[in-house]
Amino acid sequence: MPVIDVEQAKDNAPCRITVCSWSVNTTINLRDPKQVAELFERSAGVVRTSKYLQGSALHLPAAGQMVVTGDLHGNIPHLEALVQLADLSSSPNNHLLLQEIIHGQPLVNDVDLTHRALARVAELVAAWPDQVHVILANHELSQLRGTSVGRGSGDNVQQFNDGLTFVYGDSWVDVSEAINCFIEALPLALLTERGLWCSHSLPPARVMERFDFSVLERPMTETDRKGPGGAAYQLVWGRSQTESQIMSLRERFGVELVCIGHAKVESGAESVGKHLLMLNSDHTQGAAVVIDLTQIPSAVQAVAQSIQLTTLVNRGASP
């Protein structure tokens, strides 16, 4: 996780965070609330106008490759390794898929500072608008709606808001509203021409037959985001996926491989049957997979190709 040096000479003094080298030239001061708010608003516009966006899903052609990740939860060294692994500058057909950026450890003075990781991601989206893709996850949805969510260390939404207050003082609301604008723009899923499906999770098995898949074909509504019955809510919160669910996606969308996060995967990457890949990218064994978009692998093949991100961090992110 990031090395953190907090200096609080007076109330609401911003913190200083030192992280590994960043491969995007940072043009904003992350301690300036106006610049940060403008970044999130600008990046939200980039997401909404993506040439790949149709409704609430991204649709990519069978060209190039994509680094697919699981939950990140503020792990900036892993994010940096992923950026270098994606090698975005070498080809416009190199892609990076990210999810669940916020709500992580360690807390600093009992507040969550993962808005900084989200700001880094927003920078990436602005710098590589057709190559860096972020999908909606349950923690971002909870932050947007202000509904309590936790990972064993208290209310993550409140801790995140406390972090914004700690850094930006009375201007925290402006930054929070801009972050919500960015989150609200995020698509639900990414699909490719050759049958790759990426989403944070899948609807609960008990509602799969009546799930409103039309949400992928149109812009999301507030009703979609509201739990427990909203389509977006169900798609990012569902657990315990079944083989019949995967077969349903294969029949409806021609899916060959389903990639999801939203699970504690001790090894970083795990296959469930032939067509479901579960990824976790935030912990010591956190992993990612580089997928050839012209030839989608099986879940077992994808696990065999997975890369533990700690090894990349330790050797300078060279694959």
Image: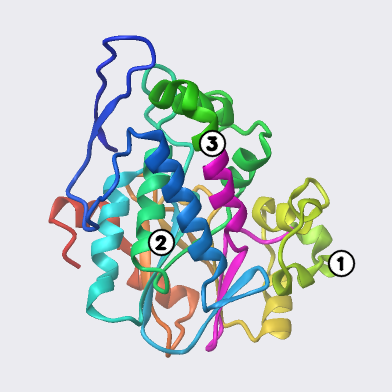
Badge 1, how many Cα within 10 Å: few under 14, some, many 20+?
few
Specify the farthest residue to the top.
10
Residue drawn 58% across the image and 56% down it: 136
Q: Based on the picture, tell me whether residue 136 belongs to the magenta stretch.
A: no
* Amino acid type indicated by mark 2: Val
In the foreground, 114 or 127: 127
Indicate which label's residue lies in the foreground, 2 or 1.
2
Residue type at tag 3: Ser
> Which mark is first along the chain, 1 or 2?
2
- Measured as percent of width and height from the top left, residue 31 is found at 32, 33
The residue at the point 35 percent across, 59 percent down is 124
Tell me which corner region of the image, top left, top right, bottom left or bottom right, holds residue 300.
bottom left
The location of residue 129, given as percent across then percent down, is: 41, 69
Q: Residue furthest left?
A: 315
**Residue 283, numbered label:** none
Q: In this rendering, is residue 20 above or below 33?
A: below
Question: Does residue 34 appear in this view?
Answer: yes
- Residue 146 horizontal/vertical position (percent): 66, 34
User: Does the residue at mark 2 contact the one at mark 3 (Cβ under 8 Å)?
Assistant: no
Q: Which residue is mark 3?
A: 176
- Which range of residues does the magenta coloring cover? 176-203
Instruction: Report, in whole angstroms, how far the alpha carbon at label 2 lies from the one at label 1.
Output: 34 Å
Secondary element under disc 1, as helix, strand or loop, is helix
Q: Which x, y percent locates residue 309?
A: 28, 55
Q: Earlier in the sequence, mark 3 or mark 1?
A: 3
For label 1, the residue is 210
Q: Which residue is mark 2?
A: 125
